[in-house]
Amino acid sequence: MCRVLAYIGPEIPLEDLLLTPSNSLVNQALDPEHYPDLHLAGWGFGAWSEHLLEPEDPFLYRRPMAAFYDDNATRIIPSLRTSTMLGHVRAAAYDSKAVIVDENCHPFSFDETPWILAQNGDLPGWMLLQRELLQHCEDRYLKQMRGTTDTEFLYVLLLSLLEGDSNEDVQRAVETMVRLVAQAMADLELPALAKMKMALVSPNRIIGFNVGLGHHGETNPAGDWRKLRESGPGTDDYALSMLLEPMYMLMGRHVPEEDKDYDFEACDEAEATVAMFASEPLTDDETGWSTVEFGEIVFLENTGGRVTRSVGRLSV
């Protein structure tokens, strides 16, 4: 699966997130801790900064190549700072029909919305499922689709279901999206395991959710992901383990030190000025990182230099 990293906090060098940590997002494209394959199908990031000429809009960078082969990464990233960032490296199974172009790289960003989105997941048969789901999509978002990925279509669907930008509005939209996908699979007799682990990001806000459907399209698959993982790649149990495994988050502070490649430390929420939501911790060990379990949604917000967190269960 793909790897996702979202950040909110004080303005920091972008390289502190994407390049220098031992398990930075760029390094995860080559050697992810929790996934057996390389991420060769593209990468990208969206970053907000008060130092940009248009600070209200994200600086968006996407390239259809492996992040660790992108020579621009070490040229552009050290020149940028960010207070809100969403990054992504894309994994895609080999397929001669796969389209690897800028338009299919995450994160996705449309006009008329403050939200950008990246996904660690997969929606099999999504092009057929559109027969049932297009009726729920607004034209203003459909017209902005440029690529051929399930994630961009789910972005359209989720934006179309949003009735506002509050946490409650977003949770309702996510729950409705999952139910609609499950019902479309049932109606078209296309049940399949689907992973919808997403980060929805706007300035100073991250909403991350860990949700999906089981092999038979069920909304409540269960199992111990660690034990399921023992079955090995290529098995149904292994695929289910990838669905049920957690996402990760950090509440902490940015503490740059010249002799360290990782400039963050975990702390109590009452003192936190930084929050991250990720597919994998940025360190080889997971000290200081907590989990967002399957079926959970987390709301992270930076207000006046303090970061708050709220975790809930999705009702699907």
Image (cartoon, rainbow, N blue to C red):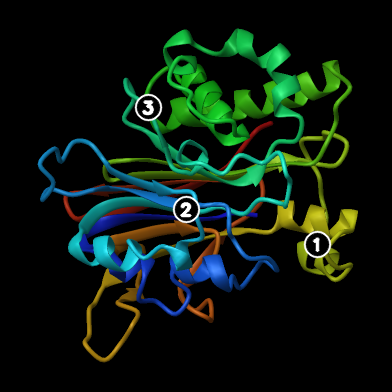
Given the image, on which type of amino acid does mark 3 rest? Phe
Do labels 2 and 3 touch, CB within 8 Å?
no
Q: CA distance from mark 2 to mark 3?
A: 18 Å
* Alpha carbons under labels 1 and 2: distance apart: 30 Å
Horizontal and vertical percent position of residue 64:
49, 49
One can see residue 252 in this view: no
Q: Quadrant of the N terminus?
A: bottom right
Q: Position of residue 59 (x, y in %)?
A: 26, 44
Residue 34 quadrant:
bottom right
- Pointer 3 residue: 110
User: Separation of disc 1 and disc 3 at Cα?
Assistant: 37 Å
Q: Label 2: few (<14), some or many (≥20) within 10 Å?
A: many
Q: Residue at x 26, y 49 (%)?
A: 302
Label drawn at residue 224: 1
Q: Position of residue 125 (x, y in %)?
A: 76, 30
Q: Amino acid at mark 2?
A: Trp
Give the side of residue 194 with respect to residue 257, left or right.
right
Q: Earlier in the sequence, mark 2 or mark 3?
A: 2
Q: Amino acid at mark 1?
A: Asp
How packed is label 1: few (under 14 Cα within 10 Å), some, or many (20 or more)? few
Tag count in the figure?
3
Judge depth for marks 1 and 2 and give the one in front: 2
Which mark is nearer the camera, 2 or 3? 2
Q: Quadrant of the C terminus?
A: top right
Q: Nearer the viewer, mark 1 or mark 3?
A: 3
Q: Earlier in the sequence, mark 1 or mark 3?
A: 3
Q: Within 10 Å of the Cα at label 3, are there few (<14), some (14-19), or many (20+) other Cα atoms? A: some
| Residue beneath the point at 26% across and 57% down | 9
Q: Nearer the viewer, residue 18 or 314?
A: 18
What label does residue 43 carry, if any? 2
Residue at screen point 61% across, 37% down: 314
